[in-house]
Amino acid sequence: MTTTWKITLRILRQKQGETKTSWQDFSLDIDPDETVLDAVERVWAFQDRSLTFRHACHHSTCGACGMRVNNIEKLTCITPIRSVTHNNGMLRIEPLRNFPIVSDLVVDVSHFFQELEIMQAPAVSSNSTANLDYEEVFPDVAEKERLIDCIECGLCVSACPVALTDEAYVGPAALSGLHQALAANALSANLALADNHSGVWRCHSAFECSAVCPSNVEPGYRIMDLRKKLMRKNFHQWFGGKEAGK
Amino acid sequence: MMDKPTILIIGAGFTGCALAYDLTLRGFSVTVVDRGEICSGTSGRTHGLLHSGSRYCVNDPEAAVECIEENTILRRIARQCIEFNNGLFLAISEEELAYKETFKAGAEKCGIPIRWMDKKDILSREPAINPQVLGGFEVPDGSFDPLRLALAFAGSARNRGAIFLPFHQVESIHIDGRSSVDFIILTDRHTGRSIEQHADMVINATGAWAGKIAEMAGVNVPVIPSPGVMVAFEKRMSNYVVNRLSLPGDGDIIIPQRRMSVIGTTSFEVNDADYIPVDQGMVKEMVDRAIEMIPAIARVKIRASYMSARPLIQTGTNARSLSRTFKVFDHETDHGLKGFITITGGKATTCRVMAEKTADLVCEKFAWRKTCQTKDFELDSYRTFYNRQA
Amino acid sequence: MKGSPSPRNFLQWFDPRGRSAGSWGFMLNRITGLGLVLYLAMHMIVLFQLTRGAEAYDSFIQLMKNPIFIIGELLVIAAGIMHGINGIRIGLTSFGIAVRYQLTMLIIAGIISAGGILFFAIHMLGGA
């Protein structure tokens, strides 16, 4: 009853400490409703045990399995094979961009997590503050709590053209983290962290972050909203008058 | 004072990470190895239910008591990655309603605080629930982010000196002439190179794979990987964790998590847990069961379906009826092999106490007089696991 | 380190594979911006011709009537229109205005730009 596709995974391989990279092809028969992560895991399980990749939850809550699939950043655990190729098709799998590569598909996320930690983004927040400010929240559940949308997968950073060239750029995830921290607890969040040439003002409006985000974070919207908040604050500082509520 | 004993933990799931934290706090020198990163096996793929113990309060009070105690402790120490919105045990059929008193007595006996809610009360709080509901109990369930819970333990351990070697595969375990584990050979999967790792004690915390690792040391651990399917829907349909007011069965829990609802699970047995394909028949069964509790879920798209292999300790009975509590195998008393312990079984909610009991045994072996401190402090931020080592 | 951000990666800005519409806006703004800067430099050189007397300037202007230069001028106008109109979109979103409609605004900016370029093309090339 289930269909089977024959596909080729072309995976970018590299060992730690070696500069050489190479593409390696793996062909496999797979149900197209399985995910790209399933395909990668099958390669590891049945064809090549030396393949390294990050993964944990397999249902888009942990954010570990981000990769570039045919040049597009994907959270591979929720990307069905069907949605990215066809029968007898090929999938090019690469590690995320703009992160130091450790080996194969594993990237070093330490700097990325440190930036997020500096922003003091909470992992859990009330429904009313976890949702984007334009989203409707029913009053009955507003104070129930939930894990926030950002799963810290790094897809936005990989897709960002500015992050490609500027190592100092704080990046869409961390800026979104600050925006989330501000929503959850305006008093402890430090808006000044975004108000510099490596912060929100470095963004060049390609909106790729929002395009690839698998988890409704809308980093592009959040960065622009931070700019609005900063302009309002700075305007009041320069021209006197009372500072509007943050 | 003697030198710090060195402990090597195999497996960076919930148990391995919590154990690393416990042992580090007690002053041991700890190294954790895993062939994946953190939570790359069963732990990462749990549905994320923080048990109140209610699920087991009738048929497995021992597990239930453990759960409610650990639930209370995690509320204190791991607040950072847990949604505490409580859970509901729904009576939808008359049969389930008849179970009310048995459940109530069980919960009371185990010390789980519960409260009866009538139909109107339930539907006003959770409008998506099946309107045929007859009533239900509110219990202190929660839901957590699997990776982040393990990272919080691992980060706290690492910040206090534990060494983590992710992507290191155990190749062989070597025993010296005195029947004691001497060293293990690892492959660093980043580089492909082999390394030899010595330790005063090796702890096998590989869950469903514990049998395979124990085999390398020449001992037998009766663990069978028992996978179950989980289905994540694209929409958060409730804020309470939704259960059925009956004995535990297949597909009877819907867990809200971020913007999703996750339903689980089933239970069967496999020999090898390295790759378990998703059984579409089971997915369909899960969807049908979810619709019984929340009818509107029929119109919600499935975001992911995945398999997770629990470690079930074999005692010759069928998988579901086994106690969900964990077991520590002391291979010195069991098989005359020194310096090797296996910890397996259990569940995410009880990972801290599993670590505590294992660490107690380790302390006994080394005559190391330190008691467990993991209840006392809030865990460090899970993000600090990724801090670059100074 | 391999994979890390580096200014040398800038060529990848112009690799459209896998990228969304927003990146086209980003790419075009970079290209048109550079083009306009280049034109400004050339414009200064042209004005410099005035210092060499009326005759030199007239012969230079004669050269500019060549169709190739007319197409060049059209490109400058096209760059100006695209850069300017997309600039309005970016300016608005940077003030937090209509950020959720940035894609719609990009499409509208594209349509307006195409219309403007077409108008100038007919006007300038039609007479030739």
Image: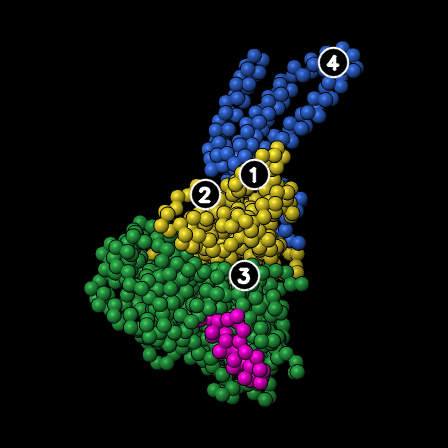
Chain colours: A yellow, B green, C blue
Q: How many marks?
A: 4
Discs 1 and 2 carry the same chain letter: yes
Secondary structure of residue under mark 1: loop
Q: Is residue B360 magenta?
A: yes
Discs 3 and 1 carry the same chain letter: no
Mark sitting on residue A133: 2
Q: Quadrant of residue B90?
A: bottom left
Q: Circles 3 and 4: CB distance less than 8 Å?
A: no
Mark sitting on residue B382: 3
Q: Is residue A181 left or right of residue A78?
A: right
Q: Residue at x 52, y 18 (%)?
A: C119
Q: Circles 1 and 2: CB distance less than 8 Å?
A: no
Q: Amino acid at mark 3?
A: Tyr
Badge 2: residue crowd in 10 Å (few <14, some 14–19, many ≥20)? few
Q: Which residue is mark 4?
A: C57
Secondary structure of residue under mark 3: helix
The answer to whether residue B286 is above or below residue B215 is above
Q: Residue at x 67, y 44 (%)?
A: C8
Mark sitting on residue A243: 1
